[in-house]
Amino acid sequence: MKSRTILLAAAFICAGMLAQAQIKLTFNPEKGVKYAYRQVTDQKMNNSFGGQEMAMSIVMEMLTEMNIKEKNSKEVTLEYTFKEIAVTVSSAMMNYKVDTKNTSGNTSSTEKVIASIYDCILDKPLQVTITSDNVVKSITGYNAISDEISIVLANIGEMERQMSGMILQSFSEETIKTTIRQIVNIYPGKDVKVGDSWNNDNSFATAGMSTNQKNTSTLKSVSNDVALLDVVSEQTMKPGGGMDGEVKGDFKGEARLNVKTGMIVQSSSEGISKGKLSGQGMEMTMEVTTKTSLTLQ
């Protein structure tokens, strides 16, 4: 009985020591390894413009690959490549679905144009350098993508060119840089233990909107070399181009990181953004529900 009590006491002491143990979480991928991620974004929009209600659903799924080429104590150099892209848009004004894995279903002129733009993006590796403090230092190779997109746009009508605008914004050089920045903007920059929290603020501009994010991550547990984080984000977007107003959003989610490499194993987030924008005598009320997931394949 006495030995059993001693063993239980030792187990509690070990558990307490593990809970207080500090770990280092940082972007530390293995050289020569390819990390493939499937990202799904599901947005439901209920907007009002000039008194007219506009509902839209957008679901986008992408498979991207990070091929770690070089690594030293100061920076990591990798190739970032889009391997698959699929999007489904549903609204009263437009409905289309494009999937690069199955192009035979692209029957409308809109679907064909979008598919041709995606063809310009797929399998064009971008060279990305990320510093040891998790800053995206540079991205090169985008010219190969933009040159091919320019050829596509030069051979389509004005209406189709305008409808392609949303797609082009989603895959602009700045948007791609922002996407990569958000993947590596989760680390604490110091050793942490279970229960510790840290902030990772982020600012960027995309689709004509300046965005400020305040992100707070909390280390909830560590098990089998996987760290579980709770992530809470506050987001404020403001328009440019002579428009006024702002859109604010609150998001909650979690992320699982490999402790040794720092690479995300799986993450998810969900939240609602609301606000008003005005300009040129018109006012738009926005409400957008967004769900995202990122999974290592």
Image: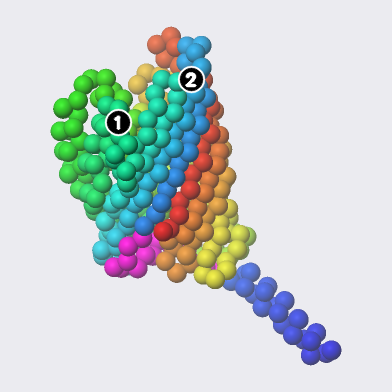
Q: Which mark is residue 107?
A: 1
Q: Is residue 187 visible?
A: no
Q: In this view of the protein, which residue sits in the foreground, 144 or 190?
A: 144
Relative side of 249 to 16, left or right:
left
Q: Amino acid at mark 1?
A: Thr
Quarter of the picture containing the C terminus is: bottom left
Tell me the residue at 30%/31% (across/down): 107
Q: Is residue 18 above or below residue 204?
A: below
Instruction: Name the main secondary structure of what is drawn in magenta.
Output: loop
For marks 2 and 1, give the CA distance: 25 Å
Q: Mark 1: few, some, or many residues within 10 Å (few <14, many ≥20)?
A: few
Residue 24 forms part of the magenta stretch? yes
Tell me residue 38's x, y (percent): 41, 51
Tell me residue 214's x, y (percent): 51, 42
Q: Amino acid at mark 2?
A: Met
Span of residues in magenta: 22-35
Q: Is residue 277 above or below residue 137?
A: above
- Residue at the far right in the pictured view: 1
Residue 92 forms part of the magenta stretch? no
